[in-house]
Image (cartoon, rainbow, N blue to C red):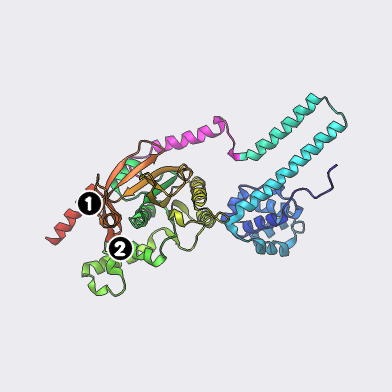
Amino acid sequence: MRPLALPPQDLEAEQACLGAILLEAGAAKAGLAIVQPDDFYREAHKSIARAAAKLHAEGIAPDVITVTSALRDMGQLDEGGGVEYLTALLGEVPYTGHVRRYAQIVVDKAMLRRLIAHGDELAEFCYACEGSPDELLAWGTNSLRVLAEERVGKEGAKPLSEVGERSAATVLAALDQPAGLYGARTGIEPLDTIAGGLADWRLWLFLAYRGEGKSRFALQTVLTSARHFLQTAQWVLVYMLEGDLGHWTRRALAWLGDIDGDLLRPGRARDLWPEERKALQGAREELPTLPVSVADRLRDVDGIVTDAEVQATQHKVGLVVVDYAQAVGVRGVSKPMEAVTITAQRLSQLSDDLRCPVLLTSQVTFTEGGDVRSRWAQDAENPASHVLWFRRSPKGEDLNSADRQCCPEGQVICTKSREGRPFEVAVKLDLSRSRFYGERQWEQLQATRRARVT
């Protein structure tokens, strides 16, 4: 006989989960996608979760006020602990970005309780000799199968009768659209032409040596996409883990105004030509009108994902940019390779959840064999739909690090493409303006500049 004990439960995790759901809309969406009201052990927590789930299903953000009202309408405010307990739950949340972990603990404990209940029921049948051993084995096996299906839930395989029609409709709807780019794009014409922009893909990795253009590529992708999103009412979310907002803004103004960024450093105003002052004023006026949200203080993937989900409740998100991978932390994980692998997996899932592409920049280095590889474990590249490596050097030439950083040309090499073949695109760089061009774009730009001089 096993000793009498409380069934498996974790009241602290239940409180933290509910508190996070009440604090942030993004946390509510993430938590309620995992946990069900009946997964909670305490009856008061079940009542609160039912109210929160009902509000979320109706498109209303669950918070202390809305949940209090919902519990009152349901006649369960006292069962939920009252307003004082709902307010107290807000103080039980160590970090809202960990709501998935709290929810998963609650789900795991609930599953253990269900296994115990099924085991106890089977034991009672056996002691009572109700049914033959074969019948009891069949009953027990079927009960476990039902629990296993419940455990897999939405992630399990589904018949095409459920999912095929919706997927086929999406494909056919895209066929009816006129030719051209849709959604996010890089602004590099040959790259966007070959890849069709970024819109139909999930996680994009952009690899480059340290200091050779990955942040500039991310900036151009943000601003080019944002200009297009003015027409489609979508937003770009930018998570900077390198540099600060002031540095990013200076580069953005240089890009928008097509101005030498060095002239925007302190004390250089007298060096600006009148036409450059006019372009700078135009860039200054355009920048705040662009649908871009920027965060430069979030440092871990849970915070980034939660913030993106919160933003998605306020805007239609068309692109998420994270710059750069090696600076993203994962709480509770100390090994860098493991952290970046988890980061890639989480951002890939975020892309699915938000139905928009995620661009993640990453550094590259040499292996002992001399091949260029990312600092990521191979598993980190698996979730990506595309892996792009930017190499700054004339095609066919190998340059040392110092020469590469001064080289105004290079290639964007697609080393992985989930759809279609890998490809290579020659590009030109105007480093002072933080701009990338395809060769044809570069030739047209030079012709325009020559015409201005003459």
Pick whichever, 213 or 337, lies toward us. 337
Taking 319 as reference, is 413 left or right?
left
Gap in angstroms between the C-alphas marked 1 and 2 = 17 Å
Kindly identify which numbered label has been placed on residue 85: none
Quarter placement of the C terminus: bottom left
Q: Where is residue 227 in the image (x, y as percent from the top left)?
A: 35, 55
Pick whichever, 325 or 419, lies toward us. 325
Quarter placement of the N terminus: top right
Give SS at disc 1.
helix
Taking 293 as reference, is 285 left or right?
left
Instruction: Examine the image and state in which quarter residue 26 appears.
Output: bottom right
**In the rendered structure, which segment of residues is drawn in magenta?**
154-182
Q: What residue type is labelled 2?
A: Ala
Is residue 200 in sight in this rendering?
no
Within-10-Å neighbours for mark 1: few <14, some 14–19, many 20+:
some
Is residue 4 in sight in this rendering?
yes
Q: Where is residue 160 in the image (x, y as percent from the top left)?
A: 54, 30
Within-10-Å neighbours for mark 2: few <14, some 14–19, many 20+:
many
**Residue that extends furthest to the right in the rendered view of this protein:** 128
Pick whichever, 303 or 18, lies toward us. 303
Query: Is 188 within the magenta?
Result: no
- For disc 1, the marked residue is 442
Taking 418 as reference, is 94 left or right?
right
- For disc 2, the marked residue is 254
Residue at (69% x, 54% y) in the render = 14
Query: Is 181 within the magenta?
Result: yes
**Residue that extends furthest to the front in the rendered view of this protein:** 368
Residue at (60% x, 51% y) in the render = 100
Q: Which amino acid does label 1 sit on?
A: Trp
Pick whichever, 207 or 77, lies toward us. 207
Q: Where is residue 418 in the image (x, y as percent from the top left)?
A: 41, 38
